Every structure is written in structure tokens, then in C-alpha cells.
Amino acid sequence: MMASSSPLLADYTDHFWLPVSASTFGEQVDSAFMLVLWICVFFMVPITFALVYFCIRFVKAKGQPAESQVSHNTPLEIAWSVLPSFLLVWIFVKGAIGYIDQQNAPEGADLLSVKAFKWGWTVDYGNGVFHPELHILNDQPTKLTMRSSDVIHSLFIPAFRVKRDIVPGRYNEIWFHPTQPSERVSEEELEAALLDAKENNDGVFDQEKYQFTVDGYRFHDLYCTEYCGRDHSAMQTVVVVHDSRESLEAWIKKYSGRGEDESPAEYGQKLYERRGCASCHSLDGSKRVGPSFAGGYGSNREFTDGSTGIVDENYIRESILEPKALIVSGYNPVMPSYKGQLSDDDIDSLIAFLRTLADEGGGEN
Ligand code: HEC
Ligand SMILES: [Cu+2]
């Protein structure tokens, strides 16, 4: 159930050089990069040749004494100090212009808040809709207000040429203006992938394998680029750019609340994946950051304050809303509170899902 641990790589396939460029920042960033690169090549090549040539040309025969070289050539020294400084100013001005652009989101940008946590992402689409994927509108600036619930993370979208650290205890912002809508794969291709996932992968949809999302969209990669602990390399998600506001809103609607004929337990499993529980709680009895959900329901717990209890509805509810009230022995108090982020129906659905796992192996912790 965990996100796979190698890069999604959608933006690099078929690209020998820089990854796909799909935002208005692409040109600026790439040309600044190429400028620095070519200046380096321009100097490195002749300097290297001169170095090798001088080594050979001025080698002393064995036994000859070394000569001291203390004479100056003032015009030459001024020239090689002043001329390159113009290059540095050029690089600085070019970089500063791009940097200032990236600092100032235009008025009227779409706003989304993003939470980074060990080890995943949650995007808040308003009205109680949260999802790990970032869905935005083409040709429309979008600004993300980002926060971290634990350590320093860093959001990186190579295709948009943007990257910003997310420091706990403060809000960090980033914005971009996508220029290409994400392609949608054909119904047949999507059906085939869904069938393959069902038959060969326990129903888990592997985006990396198919290179499109479970809703049939091609995507850009988004990942954490600040080393943040054990599963840092799995802290990845996708960016999908919609070609119309209707399509974006339809997607958001699809993920708002439990479907009409969906059972609480089924929906609870989806929440388990979408809301990041999976990165800390396994379903197979193995210990991650938190206890496994397998066999958890109905079993006994010991807490760090010396008390004991049974995993029942009230306890699960409290664990989700006030995770720090009772800490299971042997674990750290690192679970974020989901207060105000999960509705009562969401919590009931999660409880129903955990109940279905009561008889799975694992038992104590
Ligand atoms: C950052 C890691 C992390 C995330 C994300 C997380 N948890 Fe936890 N959870 C923990 C840890 C650690 C514990 C054990 C310590 C404690 O009691 O707080 C725990 C304990 C629990 C318990 C009590 C389990 C038991 O067997 O006693 C429940 C229930 C629970 N979490 C539910 C959830 C749900 C539901 C979600 C997703 C909506 C979630 N957790 C997300 C880390 C996490
Ligand atoms: Cu991270």
C-alpha cells in the first residue's frame, strides 16, 4: 500500500537533457542554467588545455633547481579580475529577475493549502475534500500555502521548475502558472490498467507502472527534496493539470465524501490511503511508525502512562482526534491530529474499516 520507493519519472522519460517544461518559469530557469553552464565550459576548456600544455612545456630536467616566480603583470591581473566580474553581475541580474518573479504570485491566483508530513502530502481542496494528488487548472496561476506537521520538507515540481522548503511552525508559499493540460488516456487503456491492478496487484493502482493516475490522467512528478527520514524517497505524488474549470471541479467532487452506494468500510479504506494513514500504519501486521491496523481492533493496549485499554470505537476516535491523549507503549507521540479535517462520517468509516481487519494476524501492537 505504500507509495513506491523509486521516482515516478513521468517527466524524464524520453528526455535526455532537462525534464519536460510545463510552466511559465521554464524558459527563465532553463536559460539561466544554460548561461552558467556555457560560461563554465567556455573557461574550463582553454584553462585545462593550457594547464596540460604548460606542464609538458615547462617541465624541468632532473636535478635542475626550481625558479622563483614573483614578478607581477598589473594590467593582466586587473583584466582577469574585472572582466569576469561583468559575467558575475550578468548571472546575478538574470537570476534575481527570475527569483523575484517566483516570489510574487499574481493577484487572482487559485489558492490551495498543502500539508507535508512524514511521508506524504495532503492537498486541501476546501469543503472537507483532501487528497494527496495536486490537481490544478491550466493557464491559471496557482499559489500553494504549505506547512509541515513534523520536520523540514521541500516541495519540488521539476516540470514547473519550482522548489521551496517547508519549515515546521511557519507557512511557506510557492506559485506557478502551468502552460500545458495533462493528457487523458483512452477509456480502454484505463479499463485495462484497472483490471490489471485488480487481478495482479490486490487492487492497488500502480501509477508508476502505467504512468497515469487512477482517474486516467498523465501527470507531472512532485516530490520532497529535503532528506526527511526513513521513507523520504517515497514522499512523492503527482500533479495533474486540468484543461477546464469544470473538469477540475468534477474531479474534486468525485472525492468529496462517501459515495451514495459505498459502504463505510470501503470508504474507510480509501481514506486510509488518501489521508496518509498508510505511511505510518500497515495492514499486514508489520510495525511502521505506528502500530499495524491488522488485528488491532478489539485487542489490548498498554500506554506510556501505565494504563491499559481495549481498541474500541471510542479509543480509535480519540486516537484520530487527540492522538497525544494516550500513547501506545513502544511508540513515539508523532501522529498528527485530524481534528477538523475528518468529518464524523469519515471517522465512522475509518472505524468500520479497522473493524474489518480485527481478525487479521498481528494482534498485539
Ligand atoms: C506520522 C505517522 C502517523 C500518521 C500519518 C497516522 N498515524 Fe495513527 N499513530 C501513529 C503512532 C506513532 C501511533 C502510536 C502512538 C500513539 O498512540 O499516538 C498511532 C496510533 C494510532 C491509533 C491507535 C492504534 C492502536 O493500535 O492502539 C489509531 C487508531 C490511529 N493511529 C489511527 C490513524 C488514522 C486513522 C490515521 C489516518 C487518518 C493515522 N492514524 C495517521 C502515527 C501516525
Ligand atoms: Cu520530506
Image: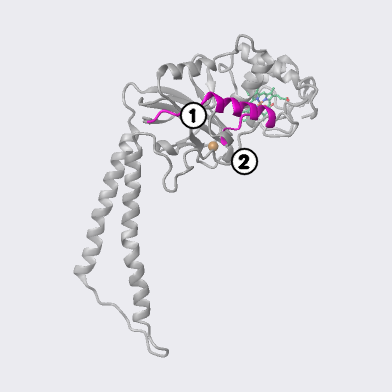
Residue 268: say if magenta: no
Q: Residue at x 74, y 31 (%)?
A: 284
Q: Amino acid at mark 1?
A: Arg
Write down the region rendered in magenta: 180-208
Q: Which mark is residue 234?
A: none
Task: Tell me residue 186's x, y (percent).
Answer: 51, 26
Q: Residue at x 56, y 40 (%)?
A: 228
Ligand 1 is found in the corner quadrant, namely top right
Element at label 2 = loop
State whether residue 109 is above or below residue 46.
Answer: above
> What is the quadrant of the C terminus in the image?
top right
Q: Amino acid at mark 2?
A: Arg
State whether residue 85 is above or below residue 353.
Answer: below
Q: Residue at x 75, y 16 (%)?
A: 312
Q: Quadrant of residue 175?
A: top left
Q: Which mark is residue 230?
A: 2
How far is mark 2 from mark 1, CA to CA?
20 Å
Does residue 315 appear in the picture of this structure? yes
Q: Quadrant of residue 179?
A: top left
- According to the picture, the residue beneath numbered tag 1 turns out to be 147
Task: Tell me residue 344's x, y (percent).
Answer: 62, 11
